[in-house]
C-alpha cells in the first residue's frame, strides 16, 4: 500500500517504521517545513493518507485529503468540535474517513471496560466518578482525546452526569477530568468511582 504521512513528528516516524516493516511504501511525508508539497498531485499518489498533527491543523488536513479523493485516517486529538463537520464533508464527497482518539488495542479494550463499569455504576448514586490523565509535557492537548472519549462514555451511560470539565468540580452533574503533564510520563488514564465506604478504579 502507498501511504502519505500528514504529520511527521513522533507518531509519524513510528508509523513510517512499522509501515516499512510490513512492506508498505511511504510516498509522501508532510511536515511543518514542506507544507507547500501538500498538493493534490502529491497526495493523489497515495492509496491512503495517515494524519497525525495537532488540533489547529487536523480539520484542514482531513478536508484537503477528502477533496483530493484520498481516504484518510486521522489520529489527531483536540479537534472534537470539527469532527462532525469532517464526517458530513466525507458523506457529501463520498470519501473515506476514519478517526479515533486512540488506535491502541489495549486502550480500545479499556474503552469497553469503561462502558461496562459505567453501566454497572449508573444506579449507584453514592459513588462519585472522576477521571485523571497523565502525559509527558510535549502532549499538546488537554484533556487528551482518550480522556475525552472515556468521559463521553461515562456521560452516555450515567444519566446524572451531563458534561465534563477539565478541572475539579463539586457540581453533581459535572464530570471532572484532571490533566497532569509530567516528564517523563507515558500516557496513563484513570477512571475512579469513590464513595464513603470504598473506591473502584480502572487504569490504563
Image: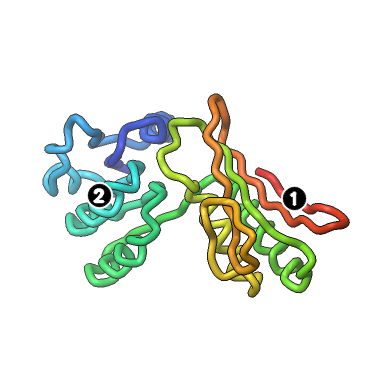
* Front residue of 177 and 117: 177
Which of labels 1 and 2 is toward the front?
Answer: 1
The residue to which callout 2 is attached is 61
Q: Residues within 10 Å of mark 1 (few under 14, many from 20)?
A: few
Left or right of 161 on screen, residue 200:
right
Work out whether mark 1 precedes mark 2 in sequence or the reverse, and give the earlier one.
Answer: 2
Q: Is residue 109 above or below residue 92?
A: above
Q: In the orientation shown, which residue stands out farthest toward the top? A: 184
Image point (81%, 58%), residue name: 195
Q: Is residue 193 above or below residue 22?
A: below
Image point (17%, 37%), residue name: 35
Q: Position of residue 60 (x, y in %)?
A: 23, 52
Judged from the image, the secondary structure of the residue bearing numbered disc 2 is: helix
Q: In the orientation shown, which residue stands out farthest toward the right? A: 197
* Front residue of 168 and 159: 168
Q: Position of residue 70 (x, y in %)?
A: 24, 54
* Front residue of 9 and 172: 172
Judged from the image, the secondary structure of the residue bearing numbered disc 1 is: strand
The residue to which callout 1 is attached is 201
Left or right of 53 on screen, residue 201:
right
Q: Residues within 10 Å of mark 2 (few under 14, many from 20)?
A: many
Circles 1 and 2: CB distance less than 8 Å?
A: no
Q: Which quadrant of the figure contains the N terminus?
A: top left
Q: How many marks?
A: 2
Image point (41%, 55%), residue name: 99
Amino acid at each position: 500500500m502507498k501511504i502519505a504521512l500528514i504529520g511527521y513528528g513522533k507518531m509519524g516516524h513510528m508509523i513510517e517504521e512499522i509501515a516499512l516493516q510490513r512492506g508498505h511504501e511511504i510516498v509522501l511525508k508532510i511536515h511543518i517545513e514542506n507544507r507547500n508539497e501538500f498538493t493534490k498531485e502529491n497526495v493523489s499518489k497515495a492509496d491512503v493518507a495517515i494524519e497525525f498533527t495537532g488540533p489547529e491543523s487536523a480539520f484542514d488536513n482531513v478536508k484537503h485529503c477528502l477533496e483530493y479523493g484520498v481516504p484518510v485516517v486521522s489520529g489527531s486529538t483536540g479537534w472534537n468540535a470539527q469532527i462532525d463537520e469532517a464526517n458530513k464533508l466525507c458523506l457529501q464527497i463520498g470519501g473515506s474517513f476514519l478517526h479515533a482518539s486512540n488506535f491502541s488495542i489495549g486502550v480500545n479494550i479499556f474503552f469497553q471496560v469503561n462502558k461496562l463499569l459505567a453501566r454497572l455504576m449508573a444506579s449507584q448514586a453514592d459513588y462519585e466518578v472522576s477521571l485523571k490523565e497523565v502525559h509527558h509535557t510535549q502532549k499538546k492537548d488537554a484533556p487528551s482525546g482518550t480522556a475525552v472519549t472515556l468521559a463521553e462514555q461515562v456521560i452516555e451511560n450515567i444519566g446524572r452526569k451531563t458534561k465534563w470539565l477539565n478541572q475539579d468540580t463539586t457540581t453533581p452533574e459535572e464530570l471532572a477530568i484532571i490533566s497532569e503533564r509530567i516528564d517523563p510520563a507515558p500516557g496513563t488514564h484513570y477512571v475512579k468511582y469513590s464513595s464513603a465506604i470504598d473506591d473502584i478504579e480502572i487504569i490504563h
